Image (cartoon, rainbow, N blue to C red):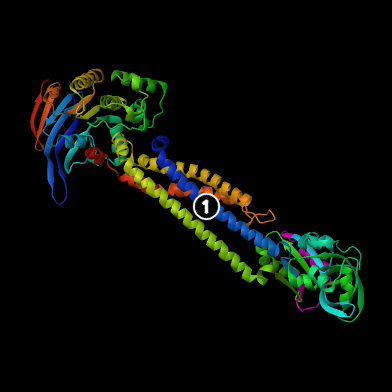
Amino acid sequence: MKLSFRIALRFLFSSKGQTLLILLGIAIGISVQIFIGSLIQGLQSSLLDATIGSSPHITIKAVEKNEPLNHPETIINTVKKDEQLVALSSSITTGAFLRVDDRTEQILVRGFNYSDANKIYKFNDKLIEGQLPLQENDIIIGKALAESFKLKIGDEVDIQSVNGHIIKGNITGLFDLKVAAINESWVLSSIDFSRQISDYSADQISEIEMQVIEPFDADLIAIELSKLINQNEISTVDWKTENQQLLSGLNGQSTSSLMIQVFVVISVVLAIASVLAISVMQKSRQLGILKAMGINDTMASYIFLSQGFILGVIGAILGILFGLGLLYSFTTFALNPDGTPVVPILINPGFILLSGVIAMSASTLASLIPALKSKKLSPMEVIKNG
Amino acid sequence: MANLIELNKVSKIYGTQVQTKVLHEIDLEIEEGSFNGIIGASGSGKSTLLNIIGTLDQPTSGIIKINNIETHLMRNKALAKLRNETIGFVFQFHYLLPEFTALENVLMPYYIKGKKIDKHMNERAQELLELVGLTKVMNNLAGNMSGGQQQRTAIARALINNPKLILADEPTGNLDSETTEQVYELLREIHRDYKTTFVIITHDRRIAEKTDRIIEIKDGRIFSDFSKI
């Protein structure tokens, strides 16, 4: 085995040009695979982050629309036991009207406890002016709503509940949640403010929202939670069930990326197999001599397997370096006007390592055909044909 | 002396549709420690005979015994081991590995044996190279050596595992008369010192006359067999 490896190494060194060419083939193949993989993974993660990074993954609310959740403490205590939980916020959401002078607009008042809600919605980052509500009557409104009513920080507005009573709100900030419908209709307040508008009692809220460590398991966790809570009048809703289209898009992207990567690997395997097969022909004279001197068939095939392995290892290392170089230049030179990369790229060491392992195993596998071929070669063919 | 090689009714036919019988029921015995020459015209079947003795080729029929073991009963792996440990080959076209140095080529059969090269073995390889007069070029790549140098390296290589038998097919076929003389002297010396059995093919009668037994092959049959001892 050691001798076969040594001979393989010497054969590779003796035809440097050919060896370099194969190495380049493997390296480019693997770097393309790493680049495409990282690109797609980056795209997916940024898309996912934009979609569910700042919104709840699971929401618990009453089965009946506009009905409150009673005694939320029991539910919260049950839910908090789940190890997957990263953030939990309870809120009161209610429909209301914004009245400024004689103009009235339908709005959605959402009352939060901001220290909890910020972990999900990241309101701090979404605030374009002012500050989050601190006092009971403080509110922040969407950018579009402020423009439409020509409102600014410090203004006092009337919020009218569906029952008709009016509560005054002080605007302390403006937010931009990057969704026009939300910017036009949401008014965010303290939980006590929205409780006054909704007429909920002290042990009633609208919903419990949460984020989990693994968003793609949200549907399973939601089922688990509803079993744990075990109340007929509440329902758990997860983001996956509500975003089927996005999910199928993401799946499609993953599958097409996988297909590209598989075909790249296949072409690398074929390239190595064909070059090594030619190299058996080139080295048939040497193989014949070695066989005449007593090298056995297994040792002869190990020479070619070793060649495949050596090419795979060096090719994988080069491929990883090329791939990282490609990723680096892409994130450095292909930029948006604001300096962020056009496509956010995710560098996943596990994936890169896996690509390297694939390159190594693929090229060792590719050398199997020439290895078997060398086994069949008889020394007589060489001696007879010179 | 006991027989090292025994051939019993060995025939060889090449081709399947058009069959050519190259060897016709050959019976031959080679004694251990003897120095034999095989002569014959080109195409007489002498090289085929040598390759069959060396287990590189299989006979169509007949039995070959080396060291009293019937070679057709041996598996490929056992045959490879036999070639490695018992037989040394010297071919007309020397057949060195051009990617390795002369010294490495000489050591190759020992490497194949699976042994580690220690100081003693390295010295032995150098002694063999000295014996064939190649001390100066032992670290040159085989591909960069002259024909004569390569042939002498091949002889040193055939000797490294102390084989009982050396099979040489026109070992001086490509050499000038002076080098040919030197190579034969060398083979003789080795025979004297190591009691190695030699079977040498040559078409040169003058060379054949230097051997102890001349076997002449004609049209795939033993035409004459003449022993001087």
The residue lying at 86 percent from left, 68 percent from top is A189
Judged from this view, the residue extending furthest toward the left is: B223
**Total marks in image:** 1
- The disc labelled 1 sits on which kind of residue? Val
Q: Per the image, is A156 magenta? A: no
Can residue B149 be seen? yes
The residue lying at 81 percent from left, 62 percent from top is A127
Q: Secondary structure at mark 1?
A: helix
Residue A89 percent across, percent down from the top left: 80, 64
- Closest to the observer, B207 or B2: B207
Q: Does residue A318 lie above or below B91 as drawn?
A: below
Locate residue B51: give its quadrant: top left
Residue A95 percent across, percent down from the top left: 82, 77
| Side of B199 relative to A244 (left or right) | left
Residue A218 percent across, percent down from the top left: 68, 65
- Closest to the observer, A96 or A359: A96
Q: Does residue B67 lie above or below B57 as drawn?
A: above
Q: Quadrant of the C terminus of chain A?
A: top left
- Closest to the observer, A125 or B40: A125
Crowding at mark 1 (Cα within 10 Å: few <14, some 14-19, many 20+): many
Q: Label 1: which residue? A: A32
Residue B175 percent across, percent down from the top left: 21, 25
Locate residue B114: give its quadrant: top left
Q: Which residues are magenta?
A: A60-85
